[in-house]
Amino acid sequence: MNKLFISLIMCCFAIPFSLASASDTPELFSTSQLQIAEKLRDNALINSKAWSIVESLTTEVGPRMGGSKGDPRAVLWAEKKFKELDFDVIQKEPVTFPTWIRGKESAQIVSPYQQNLVITALGNSIATPDKGLEGEIVQFNSIDELREVDASKVKGKIVFISKKMPRFRDGHGYGETVGGRSAGATEASKKGAIAILIRSVGTDSNRLAHTGNMSYKDGVKPIPAAALSNPDADLMLNMLKRNKPVVVNMMLSSSAGEEYTSYTVIGEITGSTKPDEVVLLGAHLDSWDLGTGAIDDGAGVAIVMAAAKLIKEMPEKPKRTIRVVLFANEEQGLFGGKEYARAHRDELRKHIVGVESDFGAGKIWKFSTKFKLSALHVTKQIHSVLEPLGIEMGNNKASGGPDIIHSRKAGMAVATLSQDGIDYFDYHHTANDTLDKIDPESLSQNVAAYAAFSWLMAELEGDVGFFPPEE
């Protein structure tokens, strides 16, 4: 009896609960609702609003790393742009975080053959001594290989992780490779290394290094950390093949800055009959400092703003509120997303769904959800509107996006409109992240999908579930 009782309790906790009641099953969309979604979709394909938004952001603000001089300019830009687009409610929410200053960066191979290297400091890296540091290179194919090696082979040397990132449409090679960037410095320091260089986490062959965030583990001595451009990583490997010690001098002047308060900027299209229920469209306002933040994440900002604006212009008003959230400082630790989930935890039950655009501007090719099982019949209707855009049906295991991870873990239902990222990591976190990398036609296709999806979710009778919090 006890085991049966426990099993029944566990089953109850495994079933998502809804805004209204556990038995509430969403109604299918009406012909009229579907027709309006189709009209929004088709209007978006001939509308250049998203292009004008991202052009404005990259031209008038440009790089906007959290806590940098570009950060407050971006916040002011977002407020003005929401007002220009005639959003009903515009507000900003404070987000406080530690800052980091890049400084100067350079590296050279000293021997056996002198060569300059193209490097960039990884976010949060400490500096080298003022005149740089010099050490022999010890190379590893992956962070796992580094973890397994005896410390005697590493002590006093500069670790070089050479793992290449493979290219995939969905970008999953990033997850296979990024561990060397995020945790490599800690693992190298544990073995006694004096610094670490990694092959850039990117799929390009340009002589440009990819930055990105890393962190140090408490109790482990921090060491300088930088990324090599892919051609320079190849150069390093070629030198190592000659079985002569390769000695590198590297200089970083990066440092921690003061604590800073920025803002997540929010614009809303107020719902007509259910204004307290929210369809969340997210993107992050910040960028790294090397490029102008066009694909990461100026494109996402433009997509969600333009989609909501199209809905605003329709004579039919959405029943629920469309809330566009431009999160602060995603790049250095998801600070805006974490703070949003914390600040809105008591109202997340009224967030009908969350979706985020943060993977460039390639065409959307797949639609996935994380909905309760009794709501999956409506996904087929939504997909029928998206399918003419070349979008296939995915699964019910959507993650939503980086900035809404913590809201999803708190229970919010999410969807993912997967973009084609086959070349995204050619430009990601580099000086090459500029406006010319965005195709206007693909950008409009994104807006079409977001506008149609958002309208239908705002009109849905019932809900798609609120889930037990994840650990």
Image (cartoon, rainbow, N blue to C red):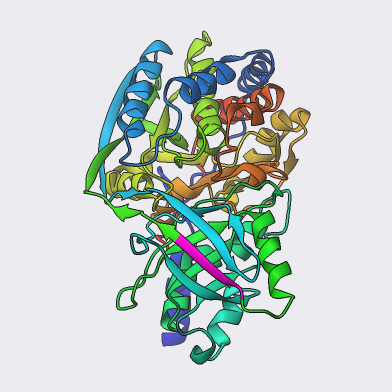
Q: At 40% across and 53% down in the image, what residue appears?
A: 406
Q: Is residue 341 positioned above or below 46 on the image?
A: below
Q: How many marks?
A: 0
Q: Is residue 314 something one can see in this rendering?
A: yes
At which x and y percent is residue 119? 54, 54
Residue lying furthest top:
315
Q: Is residue 275 something one can see in this rendering?
A: no
Along the line of sight, the residue nearer the viewer: 402 or 311: 402
Q: Is residue 79 magenta?
A: no
Along the line of sight, the residue nearer the viewer: 1 or 383: 383
Q: At 41% across and 65% down in the image, what residue appears?
A: 224
Q: Is residue 409 positioned above or below 266 on the image?
A: below
Q: At 30% across and 47% down in the image, what residue appears?
A: 339
Res. 92 image quadrant: top left
At which x and y percent is residue 177? 61, 64
Quarter in which the C terminus is drawn: bottom left
Q: Is residue 380 positioned above or below 456 on the image?
A: below
At which x and y percent is residue 323? 41, 29
Give the magenta part as a residue range.
Answer: 246-250
At which x and y percent is residue 354? 48, 41
Q: Is residue 159 positioned above or below 79 on the image?
A: below
Q: Is residue 248 left or right of residue 41?
A: left
Quarter in which the N terminus is drawn: bottom left
Res. 156 image quadrant: bottom left
